Structures are given as structure tokens and as C-alpha cells.
Image: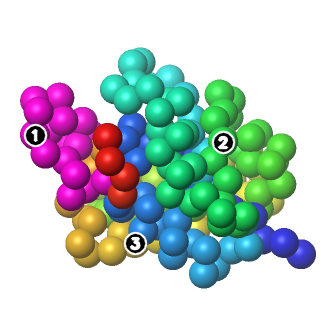
Amino acid sequence: MKKTALFPGSFDPYTKGHHDIVLRSLNLFDEVIIAIGYNSAKKNRYFEIEMMVEKISSLYAGNERVKVLVYNELTTSFAKKQGAQFLIRGLRNTIDFEYENTISQMNRNLNPELETVFLITSPQYANVSSTIIREVHRYQGDVSNYLPYRL
């Protein structure tokens, strides 16, 4: 049976840390769907979703095992529609774990067949967060070392 994993997030922006998680996930799963979601807790995106789809898709051009999709519904519902049996979540620290663990428990209640897989961030990306990247970019700082594409 084909193992499909959904990697959900707002990806505002998609960082080298995210890219690293996807590349490592390809060692575990047959297909990885990068699912760019609309997060109701984040009212306004900094980077346009269409631009992120384009940038992320270009990274995996020619790799049939990676898809980039946009969704606006419960992650568990979207995963089921896509035939995903797994959710991928990257963890940088214990704070991420506490937050992600709570979400994974709710997802498990909503869809008991969906398993969350936590991957620990590679050390060189542990200090990289989309929030920090947005702030640096907002004030014209150089973020090129943190993104796997050019803005």
C-alpha cells in the first residue's frame, strides 16, 4: 500500500527547515503532499499564497513524489480526501512539541486512522522560524540564507 504523508502548514514563508523536513520525509513515505493551509489564527499572510505555491513547486519540479496543494478546511478532512495516512510535523524544541502534541491529539480524535509523525529539525535549522524570517524581511534584512529559493 502506498504511504502518503501530508505536511501541513501556513508556510509563510517556506524555509530551509521545511525543505529539510520534506527531503527527509521522502525517505519514509512514497508521496509527500505539502499542504498550504489558511490558518484562522493568522489573519493576514505576509507572503501571497500563490507565490509560495510557485516557489515551493519549483523546488520539487520533476519529482513526482511531491505535490503542493492549498486547502481551507480541517487538516484531517483534507488528509482524508488526499488519501494521506500520515501527518508530518517538524519540531525545533520542546515548545513546538507541546503545541504540536495538543494538535496531534485533536487530529487523532477527529480521524483515528491518521498518524502524526514528528521529525526533529536538523540542528542547523533549529533557530529558523517563519515568524522571524518575516520580521527580518519586513525591515529589509537579508533572509536568503534561510530560504531554499530566491524572493
Q: Quadrant of residue 124?
A: bottom left
Give the mark toward the camera: 3 or 1: 1
CB atoms of marks 3 and 1 within 8 Å: no
* Left or right: 115 in relation to 143: right
Q: Residues within 10 Å of mark 1 (few under 14, many from 20)?
A: few
At mark 1, the secondary structure is loop
Disc on res. 69: 2
Tell me: residue 52, above or below residue 25. above
Residue labelled with disc 3 = 120
Query: Outermost residue, right direction?
Result: 1
Instruction: Name the amino acid, label 3.
Output: Ile
Amino acid type assigned to the residue bearing label 2 in the image: Leu
Q: Label 1, on which residue?
A: 141
Please state which amino acid type lies under the numbered disc 1.
Answer: Gly
Task: Give yes or no for residue 144 being in the magenta stretch.
Answer: yes
Q: Residue at x 27, y 50 (%)?
A: 129
Look at the numbered disc 2 and give the secondary structure of its residue.
strand
Viewer-nearest residue: 47 or 78: 47
What residue is drawn where x is 65% and y is 28%?
A: 72
The answer to whether mark 3 and mark 2 are in CB contact below 8 A is no
